[in-house]
C-alpha cells in the first residue's frame, strides 16, 4: 500500500504504509532532511490533519490511518516551551490560504482540547484536596478539644498556667506536653508536604510509601512527583503501556517487587496486555531489544557504547526512533535509581529478595587512588593479630568483606521469615482486585535475562589504564541537558530541577560532606572530576557511611533492612532520607551521562 508525500516546489515521493506510524514518520523526516526532534504530521489535499504525532497513533499501522494511493502534504507542528500547540507550517511551498487557515484551526482546537484535559485533571485534584482539607479541618477541631482536655489535666496536675518542657523529657508529663505541642504547632513545610501527599493521593488513589518518605523534604518531593508524572503520563513518543512495561523491566533488574507490582497494576489500567506480564518472553520483540541496555545501565553503565544505540536504531519494523529511545533511557535510569531509594529507605521491606550472584570481588584499589597518586598496594597482614596498615582507597578489601558478609546475613535472616511473611501477605491481600492479585504475586525474575550479570568494581588493580569518564569532557550542564531536552521536550528542565533541588536541600552537616557523597557515588561508577581532591572523601566519609552508600547504590536488591548501620547512625530520619536522595540523584545522573554520551557519539559518527 503506497501514498504520495508532497513537499517543496510541488515535489513528491512514494512511501509504503505497511508499517507502524512511528516508522513512517521517521522515514519521512529522513527523506525531507528534518531533525529527529521535529514534530511533523500529514494532511490531505483538503487540509485535514491526520494527527500521526499523537501518542495513541504512534503504534498504529499507517495503512489504517492513511488511505492508499492518495497524496498528502507534510507539515511541521510547533509547540511552545510549556507544551502548548502554537502553529502549523506546510512544507509544500504553494498552498491555498484557505488550506492554511484550516490547518491552524485544527491546531487551535487541539490546544483547546489539551487545556480542557489539564483543567479536568486540576479540578479533580482540587476536589480531592478540598475533601482532604475538610477531613483535616474536622480532625483539627477534634484535636483542639483533645488539646484543651490535655491542658486541663496538666494544669490540674501542676497548678500552673504554662508548662515549659523539652523534647528530651522522658517522663509521662513530658510526653503529654510534647503531644500537645505537636498538635498545636503548624509548620509551613509540613503543610506543603501534606498538600503534595494529597496530590499524590489524588493521582494514584493511594499514598505510596516513597512519597511518604520524601515528604520530609517537600521542596524535592514536588520536583520528583512532577518529573515522574511527566515521564509516565504526559506527552511523549512512547505509548503509556510501553512506559510502564519498561519501568517493570528496570525495577526487575534489582528485584524490586514494590516497583514491579506498582507498575504492573498501572500497566493493566492503561490497557496493557495481561499476557505480557507472564514474562519478558511474552513481550513484543521491540521491548525485548531493550533488555541489554537495561542490564548494562543498571549494573555497569560505563559499558554503554555507541554500538548499543546503533543496534536499537537500525532499520526494520522492530527498531526504535531516536526520540523513543531517549524517553526509554530516561525511564530506565529513573527506575534504576528509584530502586536504590526504595531499598535504602526500607519502602520495600515487606518483600523477599531473590538471591543474586554478584560478580567480582571489589578490590582494595580504587580509581580515586590512581587519581591521587596512591598506586602502591598495601601488603596483607602477616598474622591474625597483626594490624593491617590503613589504606587510602575509598573502598578497602576489609570493608567489602564486611559488606558482603552483611548482605549474606541479611538475606539469611529474611529467608527465615519467608513463610510467616508469605502467610500474612496472603491474608492481607485476600480481598484485592483480580489484577492486583496477579501483579502482587508477579516474580521480578520473569522479566530478567542473564541474572548473574551484576555490579563489578570499575577500577581493577591489575589494570594499568582506566577508561575514566571525565566530567570536563562531557557534563550534564554543558552536553547532557541540551541533548535530552532537544530529543525529549521539557524533560531536561525537569531533571535539572531535581538535581538543583537535591543540591540545595538544607543539610545539618558540612556542605563538603554532601559534595563528597555525590562525588564518591560518581567515582564508584567511573566518573571523575579533575578539580576535586578525592582525599576529601576518605577524610569526610566514615567507614559505615561509605558502606551504606555503596550498598544502596550498587547492590540495592541486597541492601534492604538493617544492612549497613555499622557506625553510621543519623540523628534524624530525614537525614537518612537526605542521603538516600543524594544516592538516587547521583546514580540517575551517572546513568544518564553514560547513555547520552553514547547517543551523542552515534549522532556525530
Image (cartoon, helix red, strand yellow):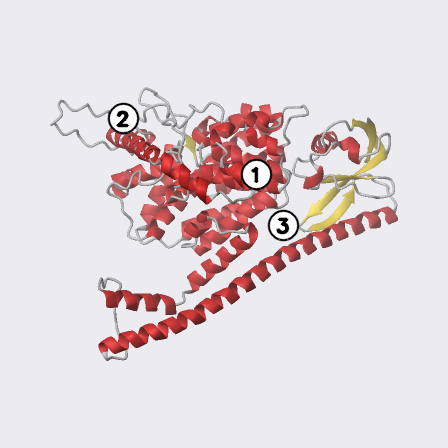
Residue 488: x and y in percent read 60, 41
- Please name the residue that numbered disc 3 is placed on: 81
Identify the element where label 1 is drawn.
Answer: helix
Please name whichever residue, 175 or 301, is drawn nearer the observer in this view of the structure: 175
Residue 296: x and y in percent read 47, 27
Identify the element where label 2 is drawn.
Answer: loop
Of labels 2 and 1, earlier in sequence is 1
Instruction: In the rendered structure, find residue 244 and report the number of the disc placed on it.
Output: 1
Give the spatial CA distance, label 2 vs label 1: 46 Å
Residue at left offset 67%, top offset 53%: 117
114 left or right, relative to 374: right
Q: Is residue 289 visible?
A: no
Disc nearest the viewer among 3 and 2: 3
- Please name the residue that numbered disc 2 is placed on: 375
483 left or right, relative to 556: right
User: Which quarter of the rendered picture does the N terminus lie within?
Assistant: top right
Amino acid at each position: 500500500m503506497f501514498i504520495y508525500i508532497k513537499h517543496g516546489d510541488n515535489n513528491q515521493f512514494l512511501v509504503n504504509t505497511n508499517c507502524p506510524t512511528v516508522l513512517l514518520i521517521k522515514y519521512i523526516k529522513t527523506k525531507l532532511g528534518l531533525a529527529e526532534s521535529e514534530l511533523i504530521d500529514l494532511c490531505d489535499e483538503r487540509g485535514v490533519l491526520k494527527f500521526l504525532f499523537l501518542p495513541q497513533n504512534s503504534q498504529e499501522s499507517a495503512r489504517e490511518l492513511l488511505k492508499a494511493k492518495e497524496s498528502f502534504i507534510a507539515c511541521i507542528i510547533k509547540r511552545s516551551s510549556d507544551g502548548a500547540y502554537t502553529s502549523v507550517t506546510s512544507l509544500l511551498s504553494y498552498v491555498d490560504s484557505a488550506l492554511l487557515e484550516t490547518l491552524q484551526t485544527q491546531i487551535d482546537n487541539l490546544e483547546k482540547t489539551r487545556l480542557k484535559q489539564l483543567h479536568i485533571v486540576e479540578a479533580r485534584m482540587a476536589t480531592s484536596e478540598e475533601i482532604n482539607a475538610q477531613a483535616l479541618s474536622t480532625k483539627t477541631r477534634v484535636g483542639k478539644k483533645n488539646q484543651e482536655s490535655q491542658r486541663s489535666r496538666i494544669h490540674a496536675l501542676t497548678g500552673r498556667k504554662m508548662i515549659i518542657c523539652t523534647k528530651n523529657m522522658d517522663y509521662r508529663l513530658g510526653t503529654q506536653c510534647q503531644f500537645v505541642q505537636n498538635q498545636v504547632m503548624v509548620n509551613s513545610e509540613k503543610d506543603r508536604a501534606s498538600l503534595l501527599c494529597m496530590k499524590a493521593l489524588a493521582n494514584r488513589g493511594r499514598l505510596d510509601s516513597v512519597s511518604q518518605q520524601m515528604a520530609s523534604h517537600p521542596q524535592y518531593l514536588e520536583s520528583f512527583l512532577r518529573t515522574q508524572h511527566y515521564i509516565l503520563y504526559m506527552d511523549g513518543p512512547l505509548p503509556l503501556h510501553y512506559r510502564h512495561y519498561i519501568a517493570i523491566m528496570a525495577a526487575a533488574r534489582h528485584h524490586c517487587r514494590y516497583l514491579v507490582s506498582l507498575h504492573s497494576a498501572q500497566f493493566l489500567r492503561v490497557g496493557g496486555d495481561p499476557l505480557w506480564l507472564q514474562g519478558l518472553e511474552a513481550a513484543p520483540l521491540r521491548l525485548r531489544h531493550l533488555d541489554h541496555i537495561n542490564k548494562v545501565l543498571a549494573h555497569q553503565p560505563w559499558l554503554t557504547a555507541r554500538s548499543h544505540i546503533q543496534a536499537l536504531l537500525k532499520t526494520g519494523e522492530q527498531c526504535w526512533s531516536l526520540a523513543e529511545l531517549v524517553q526509554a533511557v530516561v525511564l530506565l535510569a529513573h527506575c534504576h535509581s528509584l530502586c536504590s531509594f526504595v531499598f535504602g529507605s526500607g519502602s520495600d521491606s515487606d518483600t523477599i529478595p531473590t538471591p543474586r550472584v554478584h560478580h567480582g570481588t571489589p578490590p582494595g584499589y580504587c580509581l580515586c587512588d590512581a587519581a591521587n597518586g596512591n598506586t602502591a598496594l598495601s601488603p596483607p597482614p602477616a598474622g591474625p593479630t597483626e594490624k593491617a596498615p590503613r589504606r587510602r582507597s575509598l573502598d578497602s578489601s576489609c570493608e567489602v568483606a564486611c559488606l558482603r558478609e552483611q548482605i549474606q546475613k541479611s538475606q539469611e535472616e529474611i529467608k527465615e521469615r519467608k513463610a510467616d511473611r508469605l502467610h500474612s501477605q496472603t491474608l492481607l491481600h485476600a480481598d484485592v482486585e483480580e489484577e492486583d492479585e496477579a501483579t502482587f504475586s508477579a516474580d521480578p525474575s520473569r522479566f530478567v535475562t542473564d541474572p548473574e550479570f551484576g555490579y563489578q568494581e570499575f577500577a581493577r588493580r591489575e589494570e594499568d589504564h582506566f577508561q575514566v569518564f571525565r566530567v570536563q569532557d562531557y557534563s550534564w550542564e554543558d552536553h547532557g541537558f541540551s541533548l535530552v531536552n532537544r530529543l525529549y521536550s521539557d524533560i531536561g528542565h525537569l531533571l535539572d530541577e531535581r538535581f538543583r533541588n537535591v543540591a540545595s536541600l538544607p543539610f545539618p552537616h558540612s556542605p563538603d560532606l554532601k559534595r563528597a557523597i555525590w562525588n564518591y557515588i560518581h567515582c564508584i561508577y567511573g566518573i571523575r572530576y579533575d578539580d576535586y581532591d578525592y582525599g576529601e572523601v576518605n577524610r569526610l566519609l566514615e567507614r559505615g557511611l561509605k558502606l551504606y552508600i555503596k550498598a544502596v547504590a550498587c547492590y540495592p536488591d541486597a541492601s534492604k533492612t538493617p544492612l549497613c548501620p555499622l557506625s553510621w547512625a543519623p540523628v534524624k530520619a530525614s537525614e537518612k532520607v537526605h542521603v538516600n536522595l543524594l544516592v538516587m540523584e547521583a546514580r540517575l545522573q551517572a546513568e544518564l551521562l553514560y547513555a547520552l554520551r553514547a547517543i551523542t557519539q552515534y549522532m556525530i559518527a
